[in-house]
């Protein structure tokens, strides 16, 4: 205790078979022993007493309360704790660990050192993110707690150069202190497993990129003795998951404050301090975006540079990336399959910051990737696991320097000549091509994306010339405003037969070239095209899945669908001159979705002879003389039918027979019904029926409701001009109904009880201006809407036993005199 006071030493008491309170008060067996010493050493008694009191007040060990008094385990804990004190943080933290202390603590916590069993923990992240530094620093800190330890570095590189046997020999020699020449990988596995299965070891495997490396070195938890810990660093999360490690620690990049600290370690030169150092250094920190490798490389490079050289170097980085950084990052790219490389480059150049799934008019990334044969579901997973991309709120993202690495790969040896790039996406570079009036025959460019601005009048013609020379083009996304000059533009005289995806807004009047035979084309989306026909003669496009023609104001007819055997989706929207849909549509066996809307001059629709895969059929807002197509054979696959604002003479009398598996029917605004005969009896799977704005005098709901089955979930009778007594009580038999919309009708009250609709969740009665009384509400109702009901002045007792009622809207109508009762009831149910 004297050394503690005079020399600052640490005291760690062990209360072996004695209670700390006995030591403090000198009582019990300890007190009797102390009394004997007091008689023999009277001069020192007070000093001893004071020291014992101080020692008893220090937290120490009581072996009887540790590990059930098991002495060997108590001794181990004491030794480990003292070792940790001796190997303090200062002995292993170096400058490379700046800003990573918290990450080190997290990794150490996941190892759970001291507990039984074997744990394997992975350290995963982007190249240059500090994985190796983190793992090796942890090894230095905790290695004294194991019987043996080793770090096997650069496994990816060493494995490819020297083989797995060499790595096994390295591990064996370090842990067993014995040189050994192996004849095979299997021999190495056997030796590691048999010689280390009772040893408590720490193994760090750095830069693993293949599961075979782990199988050869640390094949199973059973290979090692209890207490062993394995740390694996990798850029590929899949390697860790496939090996079934106990935990994966993602390495987070440095914060701005941490990045400044690390950069200053390498760049700050107090003997030659650069003017505006702080301002210039922030530019580097921003460029590095938390990547330790970039901060070290750039900091070391700038250490001895003056202000002009700093400024010049930062300006150069905008055009010429630092190769030492990019080559390090490129290792992950080099390990990809070719199809994954193409996917990564497309994301880097075109889709960073874009949603994975978007809808018209935006470019759908997944649709492009599918069309190009990238198999994106698994490809995106691989890129994420290799830390090349991230998905943030459904949006593609990646580190700035990884994107820069993608640009570097695309530009290759010709960074300033886009004609030699595989992808072209910068508007400025594309406009420069316009000024050069096209390019020579080009076998390099595979993808192009360009959206013309308001001042790009007249640029459609040069674009068509440029496109005509791109012989290897795989996909394009072009957008042009059809102003006067562009309307007179000549179309391309050649389109690449390698095209797999086309999205073109504003195509000229000419059909596609005769030579255009894109056998691999999967998606064709045309908007505001001036073509009267897509192509002159029939074409065979065996892989085309989607054909979308929107606002093609001159289009007269569709292509022959016999040449599109794999077509799954057809959309014709606002093609105001369209007069004919080729009759081959009606016997197409692959189509799953057909949507025809706002085609005012269309008078006939092909007879449906056999469309065995058709799931969705929408014919909406065309001329009222266009009738529902004749169906010759049953369409069992059809589940969704939308006939908004159409004439449907004859359909309702046979719909239950012709389309027995319908799930959703929309007859909104079908005000041209000529046949009032209705037959819904065969619709055993119908869940949604929308009769919005179908006038009640056209067909009787008294006949409809008995035909509806118990499967119906949603019924919309909005603005059907229903009066008192016109809604049959048979509606109460719809026992599975969950949503009922009776808005904008003319009844004063409901002449039937809703109490039988025990599954009803949503009831809408808004804009029923004559409604004077709310119906008794079923107990399971959650939402009630009754806005703008001008005659309604009371809620009455409608809400009795509505314990799930959580949203009620009764606004802009009559003055409700008892609304507080409803609110009080809802609150009581809520708190009960």
Image (cartoon, rainbow, N blue to C red):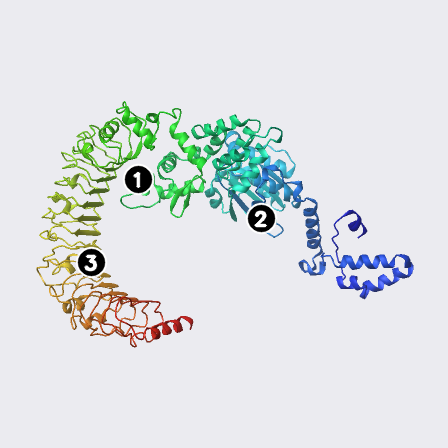
| Quadrant placement of the C terminus | bottom left
Q: Identify the residue at image location x=28%, y=31%.
A: 473
Query: With respect to residue 668, does 168 lie above or below?
Result: above
On residue 111, the disc is 2
Quarter occupied by residue 758: bottom left
Q: Earlier in the sequence, mark 3 or mark 1?
A: 1
**Residue 162 location (% of width, % of height):** 53, 30
Q: Mark 2, residues whose alpha carbon is within 10 Å: few (<14), some, or many (≥20)?
A: many
Specify whether 751 is left or right of 392: left
Q: Nearer the viewer, residue 664 or 563?
A: 664
Q: Earlier in the sequence, mark 1 or mark 2?
A: 2
Q: Secondary structure at mark 1?
A: helix
Q: Nearer the viewer, residue 439 or 26?
A: 439
Q: Earlier in the sequence, mark 2 or mark 3?
A: 2
Q: Identify the residue at image location x=44%, y=30%.
A: 318
**Residue 493 location (% of width, % of height):** 20, 28
Kindly report the distance in space between the C-alpha atoms of the residues bearing marks 2 and 3.
58 Å
Q: Mark 3, residues whose alpha carbon is within 10 Å: few (<14), some, or many (≥20)?
A: some
Residue 114 visible from this viewpoint: yes
Quarter occupied by residue 782: bottom left
Quarter occupied by residue 704: bottom left
Q: Identify the residue at image location x=88%, y=61%.
A: 38
Specify whether 786 is left or right of 236: left
Which residue does the numbered mark 3 point to in the structure image?
Answer: 665
Foreground label between 1 and 2: 1
Q: Secondary structure at mark 2?
A: helix
Foreground label between 2 and 3: 3
Kindly report the distance in space between the C-alpha atoms of the residues bearing marks 3 and 1.
31 Å
Which residue does the numbered mark 1 point to in the structure image?
Answer: 368
Residue 661 visible from this viewpoint: no
């Amino acid at each position: 205790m004297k050394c503690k006071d005079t020399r600052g030493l640490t005291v760690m008491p062990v209360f072996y078979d004695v209670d700390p309170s006995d030591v403090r008060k000198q009582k019990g067996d300890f007190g009797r022993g102390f009394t004997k010493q007091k008689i023999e050493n009277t001069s020192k008694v007070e000093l001893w007493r004071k020291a014992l009191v101080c020692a008893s007040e220090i937290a120490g060990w009581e072996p009887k309360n540790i590990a059930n008094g098991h002495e060997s385990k108590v001794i181990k804990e004491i030794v480990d704790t003292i070792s940790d004190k001796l190997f303090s943080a200062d002995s292993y933290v170096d400058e490379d660990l700046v800003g990573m202390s918290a990450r080190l603590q997290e990794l150490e916590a996941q190892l759970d050192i001291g507990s039984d069993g074997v744990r394997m923990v992975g350290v995963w992240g982007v190249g240059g993110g500090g994985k190796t530094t983190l793992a090796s620093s942890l090894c230095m800190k905790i290695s004294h707690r194991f019987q043996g330890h080793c770090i096997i570095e650069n496994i990816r590189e060493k494995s490819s150069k020297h083989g797995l046997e060499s790595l096994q020999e390295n591990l064996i020699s370090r842990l067993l202190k014995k040189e050994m020449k192996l004849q095979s990988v299997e021999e190495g596995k056997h030796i590691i497993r048999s010689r280390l299965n009772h040893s408590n070891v720490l193994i760090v495997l750095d830069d693993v990129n293949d599961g075979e490396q782990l199988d050869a070195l640390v094949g199973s938890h059973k290979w090692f003795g209890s207490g062993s810990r394995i740390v694996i660093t990798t850029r590929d999360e899949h390697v860790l998951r496939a090996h079934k490690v106990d935990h994966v620690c993602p390495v987070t990049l440095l914060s701005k404050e941490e990045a400044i600290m690390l950069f200053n370690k390498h760049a700050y030169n107090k003997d030659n301090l650069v003017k505006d150092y702080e301002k210039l250094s922030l530019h580097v920190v921003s460029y590095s975006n938390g990547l330790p490798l970039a901060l070290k490389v750039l900091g070391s490079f700038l250490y001895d540079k003056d202000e002009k050289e700093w400024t010049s170097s930062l300006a150069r980085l905008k055009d010429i990336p630092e190769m030492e950084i990019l080559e390090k990052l490129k290792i992950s790219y080099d390990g990809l399959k070719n199809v994954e490389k193409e996917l990564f480059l497309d994301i880097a150049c075109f889709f960073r910051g874009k949603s994975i799934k978007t809808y018209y008019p935006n470019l759908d990334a997944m649709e492009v990737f599918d069309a190009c044969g990238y198999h994106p579901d698994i490809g995106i997973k691989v890129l994420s696991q290799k830390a090349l991309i991230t998905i943030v709120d459904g949006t593609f993202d990646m580190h700035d320097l990884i994107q820069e690495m993608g640009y570097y790969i695309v530009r290759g040896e010709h960074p300033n000549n886009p004609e030699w790039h595989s992808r072209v996406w910068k508007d400025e570079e594309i406009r420069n091509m316009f000024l050069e009036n096209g390019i020579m025959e080009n076998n390099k460019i595979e993808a192009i994306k360009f959206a013309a601005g308001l001042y790009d009048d007249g640029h459609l013609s040069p674009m068509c010339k440029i496109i005509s020379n791109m012989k290897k083009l795989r996909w394009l996304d072009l957008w042009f405003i059809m102003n006067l000059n562009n309307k007179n533009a000549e179309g391309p005289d050649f389109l690449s037969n390698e095209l797999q995806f086309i999205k073109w807004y504003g195509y000229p009047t000419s059909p596609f070239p005769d030579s255009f035979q894109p056998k691999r084309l999967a998606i064709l989306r045309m908007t505001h095209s001036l073509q009267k026909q897509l192509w002159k003669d029939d074409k065979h496009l065996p892989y085309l899945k989607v054909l979308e023609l929107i606002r093609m104001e001159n289009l007269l007819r569709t292509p022959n669908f016999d040449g599109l055997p794999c077509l799954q989706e057809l959309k014709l929207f606002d093609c105001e001159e369209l007069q004919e849909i080729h009759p081959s549509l009606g016997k197409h066996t692959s189509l799953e979705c057909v949507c025809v809307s706002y085609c005012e001059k269309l008078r006939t629709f092909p007879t449906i002879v056999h469309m065995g895969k058709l799931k969705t059929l929408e014919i909406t807002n065309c001329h009222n003389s266009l009738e529902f197509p004749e169906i010759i054979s049953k369409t069992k696959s059809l589940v969704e039918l939308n006939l908004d604002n159409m004439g449907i003479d004859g359909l309702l009398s046979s719909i239950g027979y012709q389309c027995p598996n319908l799930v959703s029917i929309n007859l909104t605004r079908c005000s041209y019904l000529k046949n009032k005969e209705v037959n819904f009896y065969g619709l055993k799977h119908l869940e949604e029926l929308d009769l919005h704005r179908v006038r009640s005098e056209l067909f009787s709901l008294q006949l409809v409701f008995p035909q509806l089955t118990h499967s119906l979930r949603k019924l919309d009778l909005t603005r059907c001009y229903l009066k008192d007594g016109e809604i049959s009580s048979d509606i109460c038999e719809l026992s599975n109904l969950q949503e009922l919309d009776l808005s904008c009708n003319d009844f004063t009250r409901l002449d039937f009880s809703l109490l039988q609709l025990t599954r009803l969740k949503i009831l809408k009665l808004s804009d029923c201006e004559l409604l004077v009384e709310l119906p008794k509400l079923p107990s399971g109702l959650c939402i009630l809407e009754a806005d703008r009901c001008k005659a309604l002045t009371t809620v009455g007792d409608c809400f009795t036993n509505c314990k799930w009622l959580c949203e009620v809207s009764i606004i802009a109508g009559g003055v409700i005199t008892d609304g507080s009762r409803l609110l009080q009831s809802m609150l009581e149910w809520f708190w009960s």
